[in-house]
Amino acid sequence: MHHMTLAEIARGLADKKFSSEELTKALLARIAQLDPQLNSFISLTEELALSQAKAADARRANGESGALLGAPIAHKDLFCTQGIRTSCGSKMLDNFKAPYDATVVAKLAAAGTVTLGKTNMDEFAMGSANESSHYGPVKNPWNLEHVPGGSSGGSAAAVAARLLPAATATDTGGSIRQPAAFTNLTGLKPTYGRVSRWGMIAYASSLDQGGPLARTAEDCAILLQGMAGFDPNDSTSIDEPVPDYSASLNGSLQGLRIGVPKEYFSAGLDPRIAELVHNSVKALEKLGAVIKEISLPNMQHAIPAYYVIAPAEASSNLSRFDGVRFGYRCENPENLVDLYKRSRGEGFGAEVQRRIMVGAYALSAGYYDAYYLKAQKIRRLVKNDFMAAFNEVDIILGPTTPNPAWKLGAKNSDPVAEYLEDVYTITANLAGLPGLSMPAGFVDGLPVGVQLLAPYFQEGRLLNVAHQYQLHTDWHTRTPQGF
């Protein structure tokens, strides 16, 4: 049963081939057996999962149906879950049990999903390797010596290893798409505001966006359907109708205009990945798409702009973790200042501290105009580049990452080298655009992804292109050895 996709599980449950309870028990046993190799889960919720599975079976017995009714998933451990630890991968929140459910958690629970647990992640979603977690690094099921990508590496590793069919994730600068590329999955970052951020612990509020990680575009469509929608609790949520994403999967690609930015193929791109991207372009061309070279001239400025804006917002968001209200508190503080200093110094890891310091510096008097304001101006230029490109093409295609997954620890001594791995993904967050990564081949036995970007609220178009590509390729069906 663990090899079934969400769509296959929905059909199996509808046809009464198995129950949600049977499926849940089988997957919980598989997680107990295999996850010690991966470290993809922070918390397992067996009792909750079995009660939700029994409730889903009862709803089906009463005539209810639905693609997610009885489907097992997991949540990235920054989505608040009532009464269950929500740690954000940090010592700071190791003892925090959320008093409410995030909107995404509540919506998916209402649709009948079964929560198997909370997945490991880079601390406060800061990282591209899932090595900064307080609970230890996550390992890539394709090669246990390599990283699975971050910050949603726990969700990605668990789905790739067939511990469950799909999981929620978040993307601030590529944290859904990059792990998807590194683990041979399909990952979708929706338009900013399409999925509620209420109850999703913030890293950088103007960049964060929740989305699905699964093996196929069809499964991402099913999970996104349950996640998306307007939320009055979230002031950045967009009141825009949610289309039927599954209904648009089978549309023809005849005449679809695909733009390939020339800036993507610079010296920093592994030539073997470049070849796989070109192979994907040819495959889509055979399906009727029209290919056009385009330019995104301000892409070169995106990384420095992102690594000013994101840490600046993080320094503000993380100021609430002070040892007073909730979370980690140091022992025997001498006074209030000592409480603040030691609680934050002991509760936050090195990468989080680094980004808080960078952000506080960028926002400080005398440097705000020189750094933060200039970064916001570059952000607008990046958005303008995309708007100009989408006047010429319907979709933009390129590599998801410049290199395949690196070895655990390989970039720990050089944080900037890790930051540069986000070069193709961060622009979508700066502009608020939807982006999708889909499997496109392998380099040295490690998966490689191709990224698709679309205009605002065109997630259905991305899913359509990815689904048609997956109907004519088999990369997404490959399973890591031993799993």
Image (spheres, rainbow, N blue to C red):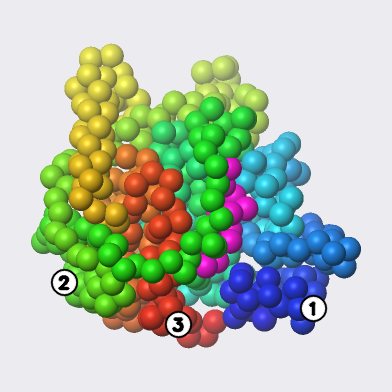
Decide: few, some or many residues near mark 3? Use Cα within 10 Å; few <14, some 14-19, many ≥20: some
Horizontal relation, residue 400 to residue 271: left or right: right
Q: Amino acid at mark 3?
A: Arg
Is residue 400 rendered magenta in the image?
no
Q: Amino acid at mark 1?
A: Lys
How far apart in space, not on screen, are marks 1 and 2 (Cα)?
48 Å
How far apart in space, not on screen, are marks 3 and 1 (Cα)?
27 Å
Is residue 223 rendered magenta in the image?
yes
Residue tagged by mark 1? 16
Looking at the figure, which quarter contains the C terminus?
A: bottom right
Asked which quadrant contains residue 303, the reply is: top left
Label 1: which secondary element: loop
Q: Nearer the viewer, mark 1 or mark 2?
A: 1
The residue lying at 54 percent from left, 27 percent from top is 235
Residue 198 placement (x, y as % from top left): 59, 36
Horizontal relation, residue 7 to residue 302: left or right: right
Please name whichever residue, 449 or 203, is drawn nearer the observer in this view of the structure: 449
Horizontal relation, residue 347 to residue 454: left or right: right
Residue 2 placement (x, y as % from top left): 63, 78
Please name whichever residue, 477 or 26, is drawn nearer the observer in this view of the structure: 477
Looking at the figure, which quarter contains the N terminus?
A: bottom right
Q: Nearer the viewer, mark 3 or mark 1?
A: 1
Relative to 5, say whether 255 is above or below.
above
Segment colored magenta: 218-229
Label 2: which secondary element: helix
Q: Residue furthest bottom?
A: 481
Asked which quadrant contains residue 453, the reply is: bottom left
Residue tagged by mark 3? 478
